[in-house]
Image: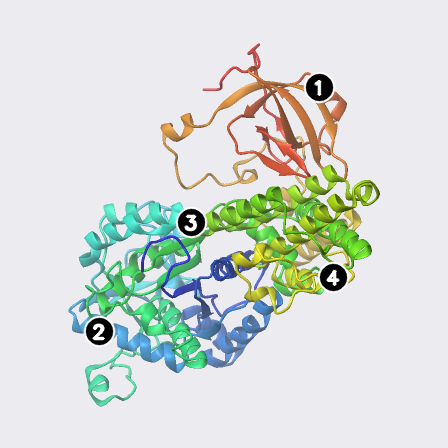
Amino acid sequence: MSHEDFPTDNQAVVTCGLPYANGDLHVGHLRTYVGGDVYARSLETLGQQTAFVSGSDMHGTPVAVNAEQEGVSPEEFALGYHEEYEATFPKFNVDFDNYGHTHDETNTELTQALVRELDERGYVYEKEIMVAYDPEDDQYLPDRYVEGTCPYCGEHARGDECDEGCQRHLEPGEIEDPVSTISGNPAEYHERTHKFFEVSEFADYLTEFLDRLEGTSNAQNQPREWIEQGLQDWCITRNMDWGIDYPSDEDAESGEKAGADEEDLVLYVWVDAPVEYIASTKQYSERVGAETFDWEQAWNAGEDAEPAGPDAGGEIVHVIGRDIIQHHTIFWPAMLRGSGHVEPRAVMASGFVTLGGKGFSTSRNRAVWADEYIDEGFHPDLLRYYLATNGSFQRDVDFSWDKFRERTNNELVGTVGNFLYRSLLFAYRNYDGAPADVDGASDEVESRINGAIDDFTAAVNDYSIRDVGDAVTHLAAFGNEYIQRNEPWQLVDDDPEEARQVIYDCVQLAKAIAVLFEPVAPEKCERIWAQLGESGSVHNTTVADALEAPDGGLAEPTELFEKIPEERVEELNEKLDARVAEATEGEADEETEESEEAEAADEESEPTMTDFEPLADERISFDDFEDLDIRVGRIESAEGIEGADKLVRLEVDIGAETRQIVAGLKQLHDIDDLEGQKVVVLANLEKAELFGVESNGMVLAAGDQADLLTTHGDAEPGTKVQ
């Protein structure tokens, strides 16, 4: 691993957290997998050699219990969902180089070899521990099937994790007042002998590791608190018969598959699950050949490196949900370090996805299911764009059909699609392609494409998939402004030579958009590529191709994106409401957040805490706050922007000057009433282009109704907010 800017000379491995083979996928699950796919494709667009891998998490108690309830074996049960996931991901253009599962032979062998290595290096020991037991049902209870009270924060918790409170990992026996979630019976704790991984020995290493870890700030900062509180050694075995057997010395010497000891110990699911990252990379290498991708070079530290040294091996990037940060920044790096493997270069931890401001509820069918989205006839790249660019990756994202329609219509149709169609159609009708006898793109357009490439590259190195998408939408907005400003339909008669230059520039911009937007909208960009008459596939292009001269000939272009009608969204919302009502019919639902009473609450009532988005996990320093230049402003004029459903162009007096600012207020405010209003403006925000109109600042507003922030007194325009 180099820690140099991408692209590097090393091989990169991008992984996604393994989906648990225990239920159907919904759009909330897809955020991580779409994010991982966008990031892996972006690396490849930079020219980085990359393997994108994942697999299904097959083991654990929930699989065993649910399989028993359905009358099938755990393997059959989990394989059914594994096959479903294998079929679902390609429907959303999530293109893994290898997608395996944790129960296959490769993962079993690599997991046992890694654990054996940890044992031989002295990082594993035996210890008597208390294990939950249901005396009434005569059943030992793995920690996931025990609930009680967290001993650290007092919140309700699972047996292995305080999922509703401090999110701390809990060792077996730590939870207070345990109850079996299977039977509801009070649980007892009995002594059993188990294997422990000595995580506490890696505290100093993990502190240094976090200092150099890249990715999202939540993954970098949250684990420090756990280290400061003191790391607990980690029980890595369970009393079950479903999982990977703990390797015995006899099996290692004979070369035979390890068998369970007398207590039927299997490895805890969080031991074998991350090893699937290595196993899946190995399977990819075996399929394509080590000369194409060498899994050992990517994952092994090398003979000259202190185990898992920071300068050895490949560039490992984990893309996960934020609920498994601890596993990927504490346990997994310690396992890698202790067994001589490469540490991760980066961990990208996504926020959660809510639905219309509330949590997904699979039991109440309150979800937009992955297959449902496809069955409704929407293109997968629309959802990819929404999930990838709707806020920073680590923030929670709210999905609603209304917001989905708004972003599709305004940004994909109105900005990207509008530029591509109007420019390529003009080129096709007037020149049959990119105009001939033009000496390359103009300096202005070449400079703007280079700027977009720089923005794209910076986004990849900042681990910001939102900025990857924004680099392209800003370029398309420039294209709309450029063609509108130059009016080639007038130049055809008045200045034919200049008309050819302008349209050539537009075709060059379209080619650049196809290359740079491919990670976000791969299927749509392949269609652009075909319309441009380019050879090969856009999936094999790199940023250098964005400035390569267009091939020349064009196919007759068609609209790339279609607007979603408002009545279509109303229909979808009605379907969702009907499903939720049917699923909850007859229930005495006391959970305010998801009850029918809460959903039908009077709009005039006071908001409760569940009405608000969750607070940010990370804090900023006072110095960071002082960097924000927030001013009082007064709106001098306001007018709608043609073709944009929401956007308004404002002239805002901020004291020293009057700024042009674009704001999404059209549908929420009477434009005629905006003139003269006091507002609060973020003045040092980077400039942006929306529908070809430059926006130089941001007007601050609260909530979905865009409640404009103002001042109580008579502060003059230009007054700084402190």
Q: Earlier in the sequence, mark 2 or mark 1?
A: 2
Write down the residue under mark 3.
164
> Which amino acid type is marked by label 4?
Leu
Q: CA–CA distance between discs 4 and 2?
A: 59 Å
Write down the residue under mark 2.
117
Residue 361 shows in the view: no
Q: Residue extending furthest right?
A: 493
Q: Which element carries disc 3, helix, strand or loop?
A: loop
Foreground mark, 2 or 3, reads 2
**Contact flag, marks 2 and 1 (Cβ < 8 Å):** no
Mark 2, Cα crowd under 10 Å, few <14 / some 14-19 / many 20+, is some
Write down the residue under mark 1.
675
Foreground mark, 1 or 4, reads 4
**Which quadrant does the C terminus fall into?**
top left
Q: CA–CA distance between discs 1 and 3?
A: 47 Å
Q: Position of residue 41 (x, y in %)?
A: 51, 61
Foreground mark, 2 or 1, reads 1
Q: Earlier in the sequence, mark 1 or mark 3?
A: 3
Write down the residue under mark 4.
554
Q: Earlier in the sequence, mark 1 or mark 4?
A: 4
Answer with the quarter of the image where residue 429 lies.
bottom right
Q: Which element carries disc 1, helix, strand or loop?
A: loop
